[in-house]
Amino acid sequence: MTTPPPPAPTRILVLNSGSSSVKYQLLDMRNAARLAVGLVERIGEQTSRLVHTPLVDGGAGLRERTGPIADHEAALRAVAEELAADGLGLDSPELAAIGHRVVHGGLRFSAPTVVDDEVLAEIERLVPVAPLHNPANITGIRTARALRPDLPQVAVFDTAFHTTMPESAARYAIDVETADAHRIRRYGFHGTSHAYVSRETAKLLGKAPEDVNVIVLHLGNGASASAVAGGRCVDTSMGLTPLEGLVMGTRSGDVDPAVTFHLRRVAGMSTDDIDTLLNKKSGLVGLCGDNDMREIRRRIDEGDERARLAFDIYIHRLKKYIGAYYAVLGRVDAVVFTAGVGENAAPVRAAAVAGLEELGLALDSGLNEERSPHARIVSPPYARVAVAVVPTDEELEIARQAFALVSEDSLD
């Protein structure tokens, strides 16, 4: 009697490696169920902390360990131990791949990619345009490869979704030779979120992604907008780096480039000082001292004028991008809010849409004020353009892309 072959592996471990942290989720792609989630933070310090939550039937609940975790290899080994304690170890034959969030993929990587030495070398070559993110992503990949050299490591790039932008949107109007020599162009970020949310919005509207034009507003501490035509990004607000575009928690978003020259010449600030100012001391925190929208709204309710001005500047920039992307798309089926602020801050949604009735936008105040973890439409039935709230799920998107890639490879 012939023994049937074992079932194909269906689990994906998603890793998001930061400079001193690792976030992770283990998913079963048969039903997109989460089996475990966790976070390792303060890697390299004496006060390192791992928080692990098993979600399988009979899981023992949240577990926490504290104490020094020297580096990312030690962090991943600790993660592997926690997973193994739940019967979900990295040595499981049910694990199909490890999916890695990689912030910058340049122009070469427009799709999820199985990592080999050549791919890793190209990600390293992109470090100058993503110095805060790609080095940590590389460390995570190398560590995972060392732990499971036999397992596909799949890189899913934040920039990939935006590689469909036409040159007219992606190019800056500077000398072409200089731009090409130094890879200066608009790449965009938050791509896994924009891809997931635009597709889920089409589903919410009962249409295929290729039949829908959507403006996606990813509003968290980092914030970005995208214009998505028929499932393809045609414009996005972030550029060479995540600094361009909307007002963010600590980033300025759009400024006159000459501001940097002025600060250098007149204020005597160094390049590093200006970089820190625009990325870490600007945006909402620079305007009013807070980057938590809940706190800003509380202060507004108490009559705080600095908080009110910060909110008004934030909304003004948001409206500009909605209008600009409406013009880029020509026809808009939905404006969708996502990420921490977009999903939870009803006053932001209301203010962003207010006054845009001529564009077919309106809100149902009751629906807008409701709290829900589910995708939903918050505009009235008569609105020509739907306004939606769609919770993002970047980990699920990474897992889907990684699983689709390795499943295709297994069929080749």
Image (cartoon, grey):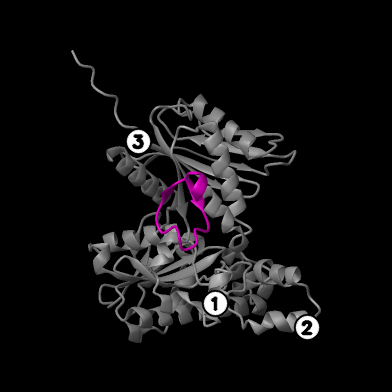
Q: Indicate whether 229 appears above or below 396.
A: below
Real-space Cα separation, disc 1 to disc 2, in angstroms? 27 Å
Q: Secondary structure at mark 1?
A: helix
Residue 89 visible in rendering: yes
Residue at 70% of width from left, 37% of height from top? 70
Q: Indicate whether 360 appears above or below 278.
A: below
Quick one: 320 or 150, which is closer to the camera?
A: 150
Relative image position of residue 132 (x, y in whole percent): 63, 58
Q: Secondary structure at mark 3?
A: loop
Mark positioned earlier in the residue sequence (2 or 3): 3
Residue type at mark 1 is: Glu
Query: In the orientation shown, which residue stands out farthest toward the right?
Result: 268
Residue type at mark 2 is: Arg
Instruction: Give, as a single range, the part of the protein colored magenta.
Output: 100-119
Residue with the mark numbered 3: 10
The disc at residue 265 is 2
Real-space Cα separation, disc 2 to disc 3, in angstroms? 58 Å
Q: Mark 1 or 2, which is nearer the eye?
A: 1
Quick one: 172 or 312, which is closer to the camera?
A: 172
Specify the quadrant of the image occupied by residue 168: bottom left
Relative image position of residue 27 (x, y in whole percent): 41, 39
Q: Indicate whether 327 appears above or below 339.
A: below
Side of 353 relative to 208 (left or right) = right
Residue at 65% of width from left, 80% of height from top? 305
Q: Is residue 370 magenta?
A: no
Residue with the mark numbered 1: 177
**Disc 2 to disc 3: CB gap under 8 Å:** no
Relative image position of residue 110 (x, y in whole percent): 41, 59
